[in-house]
Image (cartoon, helix red, strand yellow):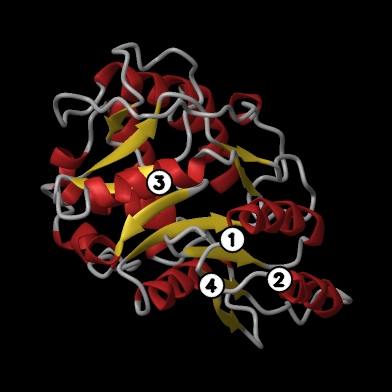
Amino acid sequence: MFNTPILLLVFNREETAQRVFDAIRIQKPKYFFIAADGPRKNKPGEDEKCQRVRDIIKQVDWDCELKTLFRDNNLGCQKAITTAITWFFEHVEQGIILEDDCLPDPSFFPFCEELLNKYKNDMRIGDIGGNNYFSGIIDNGCSYDFSSYSGTCGWATWRRVWEKFDVKLPFWEAQKNKRSFLFYSLLEKIYFSTFLSDALAGRKNLSVWDTMYVFFLRLHNQLSVCPAVHLVTNIGLGDPNATHTTKMNKTLLVPSSPISFPLKHPEYVLRNKKMDDLLVRKLHFSWKRLVRYFLKLY
């Protein structure tokens, strides 16, 4: 059996949730948690969709400690996910978190387990990610490196990290005249100064908990582990039923690959600036994306 606890976050997508569940089922986790947001009242037929997804738990056919958190009402993506993770860490010290469209390679699980144990008490590390969208970017011969950008499309972390996270991001307003220290580039500063401020002020219905989490880690000088190969594929890209990935993003269309064991660990805990710069230019904060964001928002 797999001893590291796993949290599966689901909603209304039966097909993708089933595929992720099947990947978890192979591991036979000793501690298995499933959290589901409730159906939206203005979406006819969604209650049936949500129930079919929840019925997946009937397929748990291995001996495990199973816990569920099924919401009667819809909380929305941001609140449903963050409160579910909080619930998860009320029961466990460390664990793996998968959403219903994050399909992991089998090697993702022992990768997370080994590094959760290795860095359990290392306050320099905030989480273990499963994503690497740029093949060959980690060229030091190691199995992983460190980044200032957390990848939450299949990841793992500890209670010691999550229990300090506040989705309201109280330091943002308090440090509004001093927060330039949080940014590593002009693109970051322009994008996030507007994006997070709008979300926190409630001007747009934005689910940005993962972006808030990135800056939460940076505020605490914590890095994220990035594997040398892509370990988790987003199988929800282009899905019209998705919350945020209804449009296809070719940069994210990277097939997962197995990672080799034994893992080779980096000698030093330092962020890979080359990798971070590429993430900024190609994925997160390109000028093209910045212009599209402002046109859409305003």
Amino acid type at image mark 3: Cys
Give whichever of 5, 103 is nearer the camera.
Answer: 5
Q: Is residue 106 above or below residue 144?
A: below
Of pointers 3 and 2, the one earlier in the residue sequence: 2
Q: Secondary structure at mark 4?
A: helix
Which residue is identified by label 2?
61
Identify whether 246 is placed above or below 242.
above
Look at the numbered discs 4 and 2 and tell me whether their residues touch, using CB distance below 8 Å: no
Q: Nearer the viewer, mark 4 or mark 3?
A: 3
Residue 47, quarter of the rendered image? bottom right
Seen at 45% across and 64% down, the residue is: 5
Indicate which disc residue 42 carries: none
- Indicate which label's residue lies in the foreground, 4 or 2: 2
Neighbourhood count class around disc 3 (C-alpha, 10 Å): few under 14, some 14–19, many 20 upward:
many
- Type of amino acid at the residue the image marks with label 1: Lys
Under circle 3, the secondary element is helix
Mark 4 Cα within 10 Å, few/some/many (few <14, many 20+)? some
Q: Are marks 4 and 1 in contact (CB under 8 Å)?
A: no
Which residue, given by chain and number where applicable, does mark 1 sit on?
A: 28
Sequence-wise first label, 4 or 2: 2
Mark with earlier residue (4, 1):
1
Q: In the rendered image of this protein, does residue 164 appear above or below residue 71?
A: above
Q: Position of residue 9 (x, y in %)?
A: 58, 65
Please report whichever mark, 2 or 1, sits nearer to the chain's N-terminal start: 1
Q: CA distance from mark 3 to mark 2?
A: 24 Å
Please tell me whether mark 1 sits on a helix, a strand or a loop. loop
Q: CA distance from mark 3 to mark 1?
A: 15 Å
Q: Label 4: which residue? A: 80
Q: Could you tell me how far apart the alpha carbons at marks 2 and 1 are, in whole angstroms?
A: 9 Å
Q: Where is mark 3, residue-wise?
A: 112
